[in-house]
Amino acid sequence: MSLVESDTDLISIAKEKDGLLEQSQAVGKALCRRDGHRTLLNAVYAKFLRERYDSGAYLTNWRIRRWLSSSRNPDQPFFMFVNYLEPHLEYDPPKKFRDEFLPEGMDPSYAEAVNQDAWAYICGQIEMNERDFEALSALYKAELRYLDYRIGQVYEYLTEHDLLEETMIVITGDHGENIGDHGLMDHQYCLYDTLLHVPLLIRYPEQFPAGNTCDELVELKDIYPTLLEIVKNEAIENSSHSVRGLQELMTEGGKEYIFSEYMKPQPSMNALKTRTGHLPTDIRKYDRTLHAIRDTDWKFIKGSDGSSELYNISSDPFEQCEISNEYPEKVDELTLVLDKQLGLFDNVSESPTVDMSSSTQERLEDLGYLQ
């Protein structure tokens, strides 16, 4: 949903040329292309407006408001999926939000200069200390606060069109972030709760009274049958989807177990080596598939490399003390349930291949959307 998806072509082209004449000729050729007008707009935006606004949530909200005002058929119900990318590396929140979360005594220039290259850090090419991660955490919190502000605007747009009270709103995240946690950055290579425990908020007064909270175990896939129930359809009986909506889980009790999986390392080991130029031997431990099972007290993670990790979530919520050797019976119990769950997916077909540019593939790998 972004007008500027990367450094603008116009600026990049100019930088590649040394002389003024060469720069002018290169820019002229770029503007004569069929998409030259878009290149020009991107360059103007990057030069004059990027510092004032942003290329993500601001433009996304502008498109939402425009669609609600001029494109929506008022006689038809609608489903809108909005994907904000702000809380992804690199964290670059607007200044007024950034300064709100900086630790006491930290100069803004320190946060601006902190390393945000996750792969260089993971591969040991850049060292980071506790203060660095405090700065990075502040930037991340500022991104979330800024996103909260933009989501608030969506509420205002719905109110302007008398839609708020009859619209179901679901706010969630597809993952969290590691900010030095477990020796990692970004949201790859693990199944710890730093990535799995995400917000889930629902506003729909008819079914979800305001102020109610739920401490039961639920999964994001539970949103699917919930939406179907709201529109009076029946949940699809498919083993890859939950068939219990959140209304039922909240009133009759949550799930005994919840599951997660990490199918392939992204970036792959080869891609990581290409980007960093060097791949330490210990980084190869991330070249694996991971599956996890959790109940209210225990969390078990199983790797395709034969690794296993057990945590008592009730006493060790940050998963700092691995205790699989101390509780072999619990490992066996959870392994049995996990393997039974994995059997349900044995016949799932591979995803189809899609042609894309190398830059698009690299960006999607960074975000973790390619498997």
Image: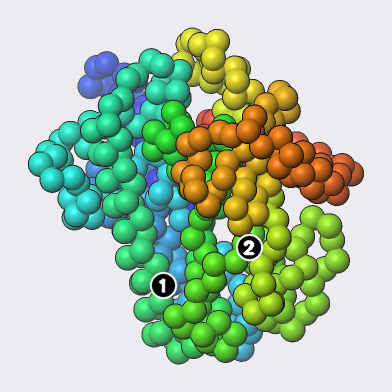
Residue 218: mark in rendering:
2
Q: Is residue 279 visible?
A: yes
Q: Nearer the viewer, residue 357 or 119?
A: 119
Q: Position of residue 206 (x, y in %)?
A: 57, 89
In depth, the one of 352 and 46 nearer the eye is 352
Residue 174, x across and y down, in percent: 55, 52
The local crowd at label 1, few if under 14, some if 14 to 19, many if 20 or more residues have their Cα within 10 Å, is some
On screen, residue 103 versus residue 255, left or right, reads: left
**Foreground label between 1 and 2:** 2
Query: Is 40 rendered above or below residue 114?
Result: below
Q: Is residue 198 above or below residue 194?
A: below
Mark 1 or mark 2, which has the lower sequence index?
Answer: 1
Its colouring scheme is rainbow
Q: Which residue occupies 50% across, 69% down?
A: 201
From what the image shows, is residue 230 above or below residue 192? below
Secondary structure, mark 2, is loop
What amino acid type is highlighted by mark number 2?
A: Val
Residue carrying label 1: 154
Q: How many marks?
A: 2
Where does the C terminus fall, quadrant-wise?
A: top right
Residue drawn at 36 percent across, 55 percent down: 144
Q: Is residue 290 visible?
A: no
The residue under the point 39% across, 33% down is: 180
Q: Position of residue 175 (x, y in %)?
A: 53, 49
The residue at 84%/46% (across/down) is 340
Where residue 235 sits: x, y (%)? 79, 72
Which mark is drawn over residue 51?
Answer: none
Query: Is 359 situated above or below 63?
Result: above
Q: Position of 54 compared to 95: left or right?
A: right
Spatial distance from mark 1 to mark 2, Cα to Cα?
Answer: 26 Å
The three-letter amino acid code for the residue at tag 1 is Val
How many neighbours does mark 2 have within 10 angstroms: few (below 14), some (14-19), or many (20 or more)? many
